[in-house]
Image (cartoon, rainbow, N blue to C red):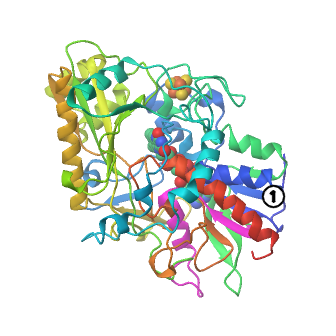
Amino acid sequence: MAKFDLNDDSLVVIIGSGAGGGTLANELAQKGIRSVVLEAGKRFKMSDIENDEWKMFGKISWLDKRYVEGPARLAKDFPNLPAWLVKGVGGATVHWAGVAMRFQEHEFKMKTTNGTVPGANVLDWPITLKEMEPYYEKAESKMGVCGTKATGMPFHGKSSHYKVVEEGAKRVGARCEQAHLAINTQPRDGRASCQVTGFCMQGCRFGAKWSTMYTEIPKAEATGNVEVRPESMVLRIEHDANGKVNGVLYADGNGNQHLQKARVVAVAGNSIESPRMLLNSASNLFPDGLANSSGQVGQNYMTHTTAGVYAEFEKPVHMHKSTAVPGIVTEYQNNDPTRGHLGGYELEIMHLGLPFLSAFMNPGKGGWGRELAQSLENYDHMAGFWICGEDMAVESNNVTLHPTEKDQYGLPVPVVYKTDHINDTRMRNHAYARSKELFEAVGAFKVNDLPPYPASHNMGTNRMSEHARDGVVNRWGQSHDIDNLFVSDGSQFTSSSTENPTLTIVALTIRQADYIADQMKKRNI
Ligand SMILES: Cc1cc2nc3c(=O)[nH]c(=O)nc-3n(C[C@H](O)[C@H](O)[C@H](O)COP(=O)(O)OP(=O)(O)OC[C@H]3O[C@@H](n4cnc5c(N)ncnc54)[C@H](O)[C@@H]3O)c2cc1C
Ligand code: SF4
């Protein structure tokens, strides 16, 4: 495996090894470009993955101190856990559910589609679906997405959970489809096919689900062009007198600090840590943080408009005997303002395990009380949705640095402010009502609405924009202010769309790698 010198200033330094960072490392490595990946968390082994929700949560989650602020219930229910993320090689692709969907055309131009939205900071992306299509195709092939032309792999078999919802959808006239999952339905790319254990969100011990942990990262390392340094927490990004980034300061597992020199730096720490790194890198030349001439670093934090709905039936459903997300009600995915809200949403058929369901069903009461206990007794008679909808970019939903409190690395603790736009509230209420209708149509005797739980989709905070004044990066994820600084994760999203983000993160990264390689070759960076 490659080992590079700290003084080697010809390297690309990639911060984070998840969907964005892990993919970028491999894409560049295959083109012969050398990089160092600095990853704050450990390197997990396949044998670390256990089919146990709380054990895995404790083992892999990012639990460094964070604060949640804002009037939304999340701040009260989970004051230190704004987001459900992984700290380790592979990032959140270790515990993602594998849903891999393309954006719809209008979702790249929400401002053009709906005009200015009062109270929101909506913007068009500087790219279109047409431009993204070839990269979506490459991402689907790389990740092994079933039900796509790119792989030719069939969908998974229909689970009983799926069939219950499919029938309910039929009765209310709603469209329901099997999910495009980056989970093998046949052995592919040296990985096994799905064993239908249902623990996708704890990590897949069979490797059937795509994760950079055991796909992109080892492939990148095998080229000899990549060195991954786990337990390397980036503290700040350094620059030269001309304002070009030229190195990254990080702390290793023993707390010793090192400066890795760099020709190019790519930030891929997810939407809380990436802006935090840029803000923590403030200097005399960039007093408000790197890449922040617009003041937009950390702003427009989006999580998708979410919530859960779990219905109880007389007969068993056994929702856990399936991949985490077997299908999606896509009827409300379009942009139809006559519904009373802008943007679309999906009802993702999703099971949580009993431990997580008990924590999320009524978190304010700490999983306590007769009614909750009675519902949990019906666990194997339940079917459920996770609502996933377009979240309006709102400037005041943001990530900032705590003025006084520091974490174990001596860095200011991030403060995440998130509250609903009125559109979110309307959309969520619409989704609750449609879910109830659907579940009752197929015989549910009780339908439980769950409040939003810690964000699994994190977007915005370093958004892409046509003009430097409106965002942080250009159409290539390249900083408007500093040519050799890139953002390669979900924080570059201009809008959230209705779809789960990871396929788009990977597609953008493949496209970005082509651009970085071209710009390096031309010696523009
Ligand atoms: C339970 C769950 C289910 C999900 N299911 C889906 C799904 O079905 N479909 C979908 O599209 N998405 C899903 N997601 C979301 C998906 O996992 C993320 O969108 C995606 O992984 C984000 O990629 P990223 O590159 O932005 O960040 P990540 O994959 O989170 O990677 C960031 C990495 O950076 C590291 N890092 C952060 N700060 C530093 C630092 N200072 N120094 C060094 N390293 C650092 C972190 O440790 C981490 O490894 C799910 C998420 C959760 C929680
Ligand atoms: S259901 Fe399939 S993808 Fe999910 S954890 Fe089990 S084997 Fe892996």
Q: Is residue 175 left or right of residue 55?
A: left
The stretch in magenta equals 260-289
Quadrant that contains the C terminus: bottom right
Q: Secondary structure at mark 1?
A: loop
User: Percent x, y for residue 181?
Assistant: 51, 34
Q: Nearer the viewer, residue 285 or 32?
A: 32
Magenta stretch: residue 262 in it? yes
Quadrant of residue 364 within the rendered picture: top left
Tell me the residue that label 1 is attached to: 34
Q: Is residue 41 left or right of residue 500?
A: right
Does any portion of residue 89 appear in the rendered image?
A: no
**Which residue appears at 80% of the width and 64% of the height?**
6
Q: Nearer the viewer, residue 334 or 214?
A: 334
**Which residue appears at 84% of the width and 53% of the height?**
3
**Which residue appears at 29% of the width and 37% of the height?**
360
Quadrant that contains the N terminus: top right
- The kind of residue tagged 1 is Arg
User: Percent x, y for residue 339?
Assistant: 20, 51
Q: Is residue 468 left or right of residue 223?
A: left
Does any portion of residue 419 appear in the rendered image?
A: yes
Q: Is residue 31 above or below residue 182?
A: below
Q: Residue furthest top?
A: 315
User: Percent x, y for residue 433?
Assistant: 17, 40
Q: Residues within 10 Å of mark 1 (few under 14, many from 20)?
A: many
Q: Is residue 119 above or below residue 421?
A: below
Q: Is mark 1 within 8 Å of ligand 1?
A: no
User: Percent x, y for residue 362?
Assistant: 22, 37
Q: Is residue 159 above or below residue 107?
A: above
Q: Is residue 222 left or right of residue 156?
A: right
Magenta stretch: residue 501 in it? no
Quadrant of residue 109 within the rendered picture: bottom left
Quadrant of residue 203 within the rendered picture: top right
